[in-house]
Image (cartoon, rainbow, N blue to C red):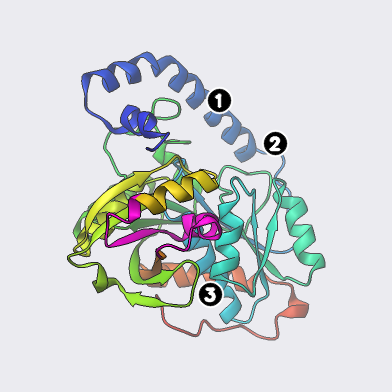
């Protein structure tokens, strides 16, 4: 059902067909690598200008095209900044209708600015009274200056064979993370031990502080209602797992780890659901105990869902498992960079680390 399955197969499969296809794409991969490396070097050398943002900016980005948990991590940093006394805004390009909706759901009291030009977005945020911004997916958008760069690497999607686009999902080589302030290794379904191995591999290559974050499936929430259920409710259930995300296999694995028997219903990342999609999925869901999706899907699919049976989504909690001090240091650096007129003393970082 998922339109992008062929791309996942091309990038991840060890089958002969996928290996041949990747080999054919090597010239394009090399050309892409030359272009991205040259562009980055021009910014690093000062040939291309990095412009300061209207208010201090914290960037949260990727080295790959998706599946790292970027949106929940950007929302997490915005929430931590707000609870520390800042007035943050989240600025994102707005690729797909889901990301702004997810941010507004996770942080309803934080301004969300959709702007492909992060510099213009920061100006808009400043005019709205914000004193700090979180740039969602801006690691490669080097024209906009930032106080700190957070780069995410998925432990679930980790491989020793890391191909650049179009032969693989990597936008830049791992060594590009050397310009980051911190690398956060995210995990969804893999073990903490596996995430530690990834973190050590990244640390050896990059040499910057690393942290590990678990995107923990904390509870189930009804997409079109107020009901909630514990994640343990999935144990023993037959679940239709609906996903239009960057790493659907990790979502399915999370549900299976909770004890569910999963039937995947996968769509291309950022898929724009239609009424026909919703009706077909609701009909299929009748053959299962429960239909479950991600929040990223619920914000689009929920309004279209027929009232025959409920649609549930997994609410994830960001849990910092390793490197909490390094994460706090990024927040402190960002907070200290706020304008002196809006910073009456050094703010603390109240609340739990997770």
In the picture of the structure, the residue carrying the numbered disc 2 is 48
In the picture of the structure, the residue carrying the numbered disc 1 is 35
Q: What is the tally of numbered marks visible in this picture? A: 3
How far is mark 1 from mark 2, CA to CA? 14 Å
* Helix, strand or loop under label 2: loop
Residue drawn 43% across the image and 15% down it: 27
State left or right for residue 88 relative to residue 29.
Answer: right
Quadrant of res 287: bottom left
In the picture of the structure, the residue carrying the numbered disc 3 is 80
Residue drawn 42% across the image and 34% down it: 3
**Cβ atoms under marks 1 and 2 closer than 8 Å:** no
Between disc 1 and disc 2, the foreground one is 1
The numbered mark at residue 284 is none
* Helix, strand or loop under label 1: helix
How far is mark 2 from mark 3, CA to CA? 32 Å
The answer to whether one can see residue 268 in this image is: yes
- The earlier-in-sequence mark between 1 and 2 is 1
Percent coordinates x, y for residue 20 in the rendering: 29, 16
How far is mark 3 from mark 1, CA to CA? 36 Å
State left or right for residue 306 relative to residue 85.
Answer: left
Please rate how many residues cluster around mark 1, counting C-alpha atoms within 10 Å: few if below 14, some from 14 to 19, many from 20.
Answer: few
State left or right for residue 242 relative to residue 301.
Answer: left
């Amino acid at each position: 059902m998922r339109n992008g399955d062929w791309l996942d197969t091309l990038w991840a499969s060890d089958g002969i067909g996928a290996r041949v296809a990747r080999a054919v794409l090597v010239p394009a991969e090399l050309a892409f690598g030359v272009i991205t490396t040259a562009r980055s070097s021009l910014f690093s050398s000062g040939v291309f200008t990095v412009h300061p943002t209207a208010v201090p900016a914290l960037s949260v980005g990727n080295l790959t095209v998706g599946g790292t948990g970027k949106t929940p991590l950007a929302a997490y940093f915005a929430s931590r900044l707000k609870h520390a006394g800042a007035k943050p805004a989240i600025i994102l390009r707005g690729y797909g209708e889901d990301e702004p909706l997810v941010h507004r759901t996770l942080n309803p009291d934080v301004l969300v600015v959709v702007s492909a030009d992060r510099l213009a977005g920061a100006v808009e945020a400043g005019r709205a009274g914000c004193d700090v911004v979180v740039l969602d997916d801006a690691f490669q958008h080097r024209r906009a200056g930032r106080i700190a760069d957070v780069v995410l690497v998925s432990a679930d999607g980790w491989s020793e064979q890391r191909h650049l686009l179009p032969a693989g999902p990597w936008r830049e080589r791992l060594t590009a993370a050397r310009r980051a302030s911190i690398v956060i290794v995210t995990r969804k379904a893999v073990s903490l031990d596996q995430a530690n191995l990834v973190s050590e591999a990244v640390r050896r290559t990059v040499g910057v502080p690393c942290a590990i974050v678990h995107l923990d499936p904390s509870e189930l929430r009804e997409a079109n209602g107020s009901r909630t259920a514990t994640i343990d409710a999935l144990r023993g259930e037959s679940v239709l797992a609906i996903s239009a995300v960057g790493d659907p296999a990790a979502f399915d694995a999370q549900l299976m780890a909770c004890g569910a028997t999963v039937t995947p219903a996968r769509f291309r990342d950022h898929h724009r659901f239609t009424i026909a999609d919703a009706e077909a999925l609701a009909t299929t869901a009748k053959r299962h105990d429960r239909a479950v999706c991600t929040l990223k899907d619920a914000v689009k699919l929920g309004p279209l869902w027929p009232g025959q049976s409920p649609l549930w989504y997994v609410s994830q909690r960001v849990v910092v498992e390793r490197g909490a001090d390094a994460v706090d240091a990024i927040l402190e650096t960002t907070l200290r960079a706020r304008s002196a007129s809006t910073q009456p003393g050094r703010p603390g970082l109240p609340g739990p680390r997770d």
